[in-house]
Amino acid sequence: MPAPARPSAALASAFLCLAVPAAALAQQGGLPEGPGRELVQGACLGCHDARQILRSSGYTREGWQELIGTMIDLSASPRDRDGIIRYLAAHFPPNARRAARPVAGELTVAFREWVTPTLGQRSRDPVEAPDGSIWWAGQWADLVGRIDPGTGAMREFPLPAKSKPHTVTADAAGNVWYTGNGNGTLGRLDPGTGEVTVFEMPDPAARDPHSMIFDAAGTGWFTFQRGNMVGRIVPATGEIGLATMPVKGARPYGIKLDKDGVPWVASNGSAHLFRVDPATMAVRAFPLPKEDTRVRRLAIAPDGTIWYVNSAKGFIGRLDPATGEAREWPSPSGPRSHPYAIAVIDGIVWYNESGVRPDMLVRFDPGAEKFQSWPIPSGGIHAGIVRHMRPTRDGNLLIHQSSTNRIILATLPKAGE
């Protein structure tokens, strides 16, 4: 019997994430036996665990080749590349285990895609800056990037090692901020010079800055999922304040501001939403009706109602802050649809179903209580996942497909269409 194939030197040099202990790779196992298995373990499991493959919707050989090409350059080792593709196509062909349930309708959405330059960066969380440029976070490559939507030109800016930026946002002056999810920092980038100013957290427990937003006064508000905190920074002084959530294990995630500039925080670890007093940083918990609710992100309508995704249960919901009453609607693709990102534009709720393939962009009209949905493109394959969506000034939507390094502008139907 021939010896099993092993990753070549060319493959090892092509893939920067390979420096992972053998014990860690063993823990990430579960791949079926077969020719090419060790190649996949060496090339793929260095950056993500086997669940990303095991839970995929599967692809043809051409689909796996396209997906791999967004993560790693194997042009110098075609034999290894072909072995990886043969193995994946043989053991993980297309399947319907995570099939979406599209909702047809009369409206249309147009998608424009940009593929970011650095492979395997997991580009995410695009946002429109005051000058109209689009910025994204390249979490796995320690960078942030900028797109000129007029020309399509892109530029990437390196960040300090191990920053692992979770999100990026711009202040009113045009500075670009990121949350250093990997090293417990915030960073401010000067787009003109590329210079980065790093702000350390005053408490080592605040180890994972997550999502961030600026209020009208220029104060930055941000969350810590594992640290179970919310933070505030005054950029002029660099002063940082921290507040621990009143619920243990709340895992604060998304954060938004209401019309009065009051921060609201999603809870990915408990059945709550939270409101933060901007002056005192006192946090009030608002319980949600369903047990085991987990809220990734939230959005706030002009009338002050809070819309949220019940990711764990497959619902979207609305909280009335005045009464504390909440109501929820099941997402079209069912309890495993895992709604993730959400936005409210012109009174319409937009969100994505991340637990299905293709990843679906869903429109919900609260007045008519009517859904419509569209598959989110990702090149020639469907390999989500949208983790954040933010409106543009002209009422469209910025989303992404982090698995294939894509930033996407969704042009939405306008009122009356």
Image: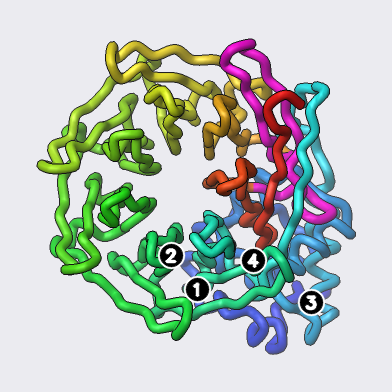
| Residue furthest left in the image | 280
Q: Is residue 346 above or below residue 114?
A: above
Dot 1 and dot 3 residues touching (CB under 8 Å): no
Kindly report the distance in space between the C-alpha atoms of the residues bearing marks 2 and 4. Answer: 21 Å
| Residue 140 placement (x, y as % from top left) | 52, 68
Circles 2 and 3, Cβ within 8 Å, touching? The answer is: no
> Upstream in the sequence, badge 2 or badge 4?
4
Whether the residues at callouts 4 and 1 have beta carbons within 8 Å, the answer is no
Q: Which residues are magenta?
A: 358-384
Of residue 394 and residue 304, the one placed in the foreground of this image is 394
Residue 337 lies, in percent from the top left, at 61, 29
Q: Which label belongs to residue 80?
A: 3
Marks 4 and 3, how far apart at CA: 12 Å
Counting residues from the N terminus, which is met first, the one under dot 4 or under dot 1? 4
Horizontal and vertical percent for residue 64? Answer: 81, 59
- How far apart marks 2 and 3 lie (CA) works out to 31 Å
> At numbered mark 2, what does the secondary structure look like: helix, strand or loop?
strand
Instruction: In the rendered structure, find residue 143 and report the number of the disc placed on it.
Output: 1
Please name the amino acid that badge 3 sits on: Asp
